[in-house]
Image: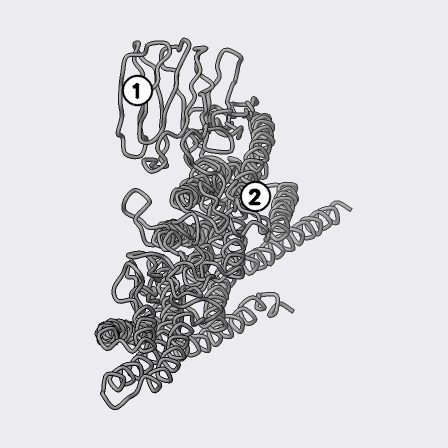
Amino acid sequence: MSSIYDILSIGKRGMMAQQAAVQVTAHNIANVNTEGYSRQEVIFEEGIPLNSNPGQTGTGVNAADIQRRYDSFIEEQLTDSKETLGNFGVQVSAFSKIEDLFNDSMGTDINKLLGQFFNSMQDLSANPAGTPERVTVLSRGDALTDAINNIYSSLNQLQKDMNSQVSQTVNEINSITAQIASLNVDIRQAEITGQNANDSRDMRGRILNDLAEKIDIQYFEDDTGQITVIGAGLATLVEKGNSWTLDIETNTDNYGYYDIIYSPDESNVTNLTDRISNGRMKGLLTIRDTETSDAMDELDRLAAAIASEINQIHRTGYGLDGSTGINLFTPSFETGDVLSEDVGAITAMSTNTGTGSVSATIDDPSALTFNDYEITFSGGNYTFLNKSTNASSTAAYADPSNFTFEGLSVNISGSFGEGDTYIISAHKNTAKNLQVAIDMRDTARIAAATASTDNRGDNRNVLALVQIQDALTIDGTSSIGSYYGSIVGRIGVNSQYINSQYSAQEFSSEQLHNMRESVSGVSIDEEMANLMKFQHAYQASARLITIGDELLETLMGIVR
Amino acid sequence: MRVSNKMLYNSVMGNMQRNLEKLLDLQESASSGKKINKPSDDPIGATKVINYNTAISKAEQYQRNIDNGTAFLNSSESAVTATLETLQRAKELALSALSETNSSADKDVMAKEIEQLYEQVKQTANTKYDNKYLFAGFKTDTAPYDATGNYTGTASPAGYIDVEIDAGNTISINMPGYAVFGSATDGTDILAALDDLKTAMESNDSDGIETAMTNIDAGMDQAIDALAEVGARINRLEIASNHFDKLLMDLAVYKSETEDADITKVITELSIQQNMLEVSRATAAKVLQQSILDFLR
């Protein structure tokens, strides 16, 4: 038996269900421009039918569920692409700064200044006693050293910028992981009661992408709807409602720059610096520890080659005033120079356990190679290794020991622990410190001559100096000019690679976004059509109630 | 495929952005006239340009060295030529002094002229160019022949001032006095020969005149040798200069081929790109504007 009340009830349920649908449609339209929003949909279900005669009668409609439309596979791919975009994005902008420093069209073009410096010496060779020519040599030298100093300090500044961004990024990561943990709790609480935490899930997805943009992550969802996030391949950053922070720690073995530390508890400390493989953080670390430091090392080698080669010949010549043994540039790279902050560097690794001391002096300037060396103590022996060529020498250690290797004289004394390591370099910081050593008022000290007296026309030494421009002084394969060219070439190749990778990634990310949008995005046309659909259904249901009312009135009329 | 509003927006914006990026690149090329504006545009090309710039800067410097050397050698050449003329006159005087027709009084007059010639040669040997003594070797600030005609310049075999005219290739731009005018220890001392001739004429010493004349002959040979050497060097400098003229032109062409943009191509591409941008703008205006709302009244 059907009842008029059932008709009223069907009408009421229909109105409520369509109203819910209108509300969801309104929510969709409002979020048409919300990043990461997935459109929602009301799932309608028939009401449970009633057994009656002549058969089961329907009870109308239920709004059973509000679901969001999304594809978890596309979401994962998007997260992956965010990591790569973050990584290359940082590098693209850093490379454009590095390229600007080495760009031909700028006034600080080292190649042009090198040419002008050597040309000024050519002019001096034509008029060895001329004061204008001598002043020009010094001022061209100043311009060259200024340019090298400036580029070096700009690279250094860029390195420091990257470092402070590392610490900022760590803070951002920590704030995001805390948010994810609290959203985990929200989602679990909502869903345990049978609700769909659609908007919280969208929000979590969005900040998960923000996190991926900063560091490489993996994540999975457990059966309570909470996600576990693992960063850098091993560090659990979020699990259920808990999050663990990343920390920064100054690394004295890396010029005091920050390492990234993960320590969920005191007994468990992991250094993640070398394990981070993607995201913005990887980009920052690559620029800081590889690209800028490579370029700075190459500039140091260039500067050291200029200073050492020119000084060696300049010292053998004589000035107009009979002076000899004078250096044109500092650092001088003379026999007996002690390696220190100003000339090269000796760095003891912070992990060293011994109390011994290592010192090095320049033994033979002409034999210097300007490579990085490493001295390691092991099993009563010490090994001195050229890290570029892998040439090495090993000997039993007796306290004290002294040996010479590739132009360096090294003194070691005291006791050393097993595995103690020292890094030695003769060229470190030269690009920072390179300067012309002769004062503008002492132009007579420029050694153009090879004779000590009556040498106003003697240009033999300056003639030997100009030969340095083409001499293969660096690794025996490059001249000073071609070495600079190879630095620019290397930077150009790396930058080109990063740029093309970035645009490829940008394009594929755009495609992924479109795929995501195709599934989850809001179409106003669609929503407007739906709105009309629901509106009509609502109107019809409302009409149903009017009709139910009329039926009841008719019924009452019979009774009267 | 289902299309959402953001997809329309994203694809319009993405395409417009790419068009703008290309337009910026082309605009940079068009305004700088270069296709390599940063090393990553063409790393190999950028390295080449650096090498071409070095080569051009060096070639220009070698040109300067060559011009400077040529000027120096030209001054030396005219000095030596003048000396040869003077010596020729001295030889004529010596010959006529030897002939029977001239009395000892005539020879005294001739001796006076020889004295003048001596001074003239000395003066030529002490010629300055650019405020430097040409024949003093390295001692460019002191006259190479002193009051008594002794050579005080840089001693043999030194004193040649070399300049580079190509990588590792040098040329001497001077002749030290001893190689042209001789000295007490080197070659024939022309000033001494003239002095001897004067003394022999004054003392009417025929043998002495003859010996002096032989020496002057030897001195002339020596000066002619020097002249030949100077001439040969000037020749070499000329050849080198022509070489660098050609090299500089070639280098400019290579450099331009490597780094200069083909302006016609750039401008054509620029206008194509502008059109494309206009198309994407027009599309954006059309597509983004439309919605079902326009038709729902």
- Residue for point 42% across, 40% down: A297
Amino acid carrying mark 2 in the image:
Gly
On the picture, is B262 further left or further right than B284? left
Residue A335 quadrant: top left
Mark 2 or mark 1, which has the lower sequence index? Answer: 2
Residue closer to the observer: B171 or A489: B171
Image quadrant occupied by the C terminus of chain B: bottom right
Whole-percent x, y for residue A176 in the image: 58, 33
Residue that carries the numbered disc 2 in the rendered image: A60
- Residue for point 47% across, 49% down: A319
Residue B271 vs A204, above or below: the answer is below
- Residue for point 45% across, 58% down: A128
Whole-percent x, y for residue A18 in the image: 61, 48
Chain at tag 2 = A
Q: How is the image coloured?
A: one colour
Whole-percent x, y for residue A183 in the image: 59, 30
- Residue for point 53% across, 74% down: B282
Amino acid carrying mark 1 in the image:
Thr
Chain at tag 1 = A
| Crowd tier of the residue under label 1, counting other residues whose Cα lies within 10 Å: few below 14, some 14–19, many 20 or above | some
On the picture, is B81 further left or further right than A185? left
Q: Secondary structure at mark 1?
A: strand
Residue closer to the observer: A503 or B159: B159
Which one is in front in this view, the residue at disc 2 or the one at disc 1? Answer: 1
